[in-house]
Amino acid sequence: MERVYAFTDEYGAFGWEIENSSVSTHFIITAIIVKESNLDEFNEKMENIRAKYFQTGEIKSKKIGGNHSRRSTIISSLQDVPFDIFTVCIDKKKCLDNMSMQGLQFKKSFYKFMNNIVHKELRRAFEKITVVADEIGNNDYMKSFCEYVIKHQDMPNFFGNADFSFQSSVNNIGIQLADLVSGTLAYAYDNHKKDMTAPNYIQMLQSKIIRIELYPKTYDNYVLENSAIAEDYDEDIAKLCFAQAVRFVEHYENEEDPETKGQVIVLQYLLFRFMNNDTRGYIYTQELKKQLANTELYNISDSTFRMKIIGKLRDKGVIIASSQKGYKIPSKQSELYDFINHDAKIVIPMLERLKKCRDLVKLSTVNSLDLLEHSEYKQLRYYFDNYPIDNIDTENN
């Protein structure tokens, strides 16, 4: 399994006077994920971009500011650079509104909370990872980050195969890119930065985004009526399917079993797409498998993915629609029928073949042998005896 590097930097700072326009309403940490085999290409292409748009200086989001034309041009130039984005975004107002999170008003507790989230999520998604963080001496959060790593680095297996290093952003183009992405996402999330003239930066970065993890967990507060899917969804179906998916993530998110971890990762990605109304709707199997590329399940086949991930999720009550176009959390009736129609084309012909075999053996043995007589076939026998399917059209069988 190939090692990946996570170059991290943040937007925002500690502070709760969020009505003050100089205080960020959100705290955003971005990890730029680069495979070890892509490091040379990544560094070369990013250096070219830096030289073109920032001459001899660092890539800095603050240098671009609200110049959306320039920012869009730079973001567009990143498409051919080999990296992915994982981001944690803290909504300070929701922290203040959530009584269970009142302790986060203290800086030390807030930073510890952030550190726990970032490392928990990175550790779940990546078995072999090296985290590279900015070592700037006067950055309060990075000081906390360094202290956290030093304190925990000797704990056996706490970070799995993770390594950590601290470098100055001046000498690290990956950290500079993390700064740019965090600052760019602020225009999508920070209430003081939102601008009607700003393009949809999340959409522009869509092909690079692994996941944007929002905290506090937004599932309970997610309002379908105010979401991007509001014009095209069935409320009862969307709420049911969304709730079932959330329930699974919350119940199993701390499990260490590789398959369960894989199920959580895939479902988090499906939830992320659901909440951000990905226009493609269904997500292809290969894209979902990509989320597992740096876990113990990195080389599973499509059939194993369907059985061990999607199948097991469905076994545990998660409703996932499927079609030839892929998978998604359903938001309307037609998507549920996609699921039923897809599986019916597989299941019904199989049942019909099984029934024909049973009937033929019973007939040829003058009813002395019933292949479904054994106790382990009790459910099948009950099904055939009570729900005959003689009239099913098996033209495609």
Image (cartoon, rainbow, N blue to C red):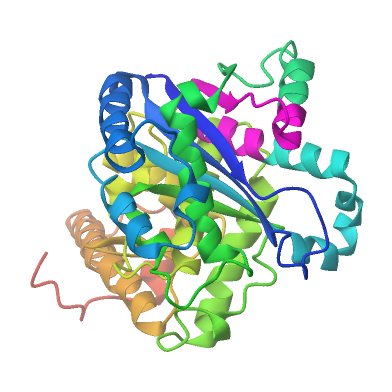
Which quarter of the rendering shows the N terminus? top left
Q: Which residues fall within the magenta stretch?
A: 118-145
Horizontal side, residue 117 vs residue 123: left or right: right
Against 218, residue 340 (above or below) is below
Q: Residue at (37%, 54%) from the top-left corner?
A: 372
Which residue is at the far left?
A: 395
Q: Is residue 11 visible?
A: yes
Against 80, residue 269 (above or below) is below
Q: Residue at (47%, 85%) from the top-left corner?
A: 230
- Give the camera-side residue of 332 and 343: 332
User: How many numbered dots are placed on residues in this image?
Assistant: 0
Q: Where residue 314 sits in the image (x, y, percent)? A: 48, 57
Against 305, residue 366 (above or below) is below
Q: Residue at (90%, 57%) from the top-left corner?
A: 102
Which quarter of the rendering shows the C terminus? bottom left
Q: Where residue 189 sits in the image (x, y, percent)? A: 57, 64
Q: Is 136 part of what is drawn in magenta?
A: yes
Horizontal side, residue 11 vs residue 61: left or right: right
Residue 47: which quarter of the image?
A: top left
- Give the camera-side residue of 224 and 208: 208
Q: Is residue 313 visible?
A: no
Which residue is at the far front?
A: 56
Horizontal side, residue 289 vs residue 360: left or right: right
- Give the camera-side residue of 177 and 145: 177
- Give the camera-side residue of 114 and 221: 114
Q: Where residue 272 sits in the image (x, y, percent)? A: 49, 59
Q: Residue at (66%, 16%) from the top-left corner?
A: 157
Residue 233: which quarter of the image?
A: bottom left
Q: Is 280 part of what is drawn in magenta?
A: no
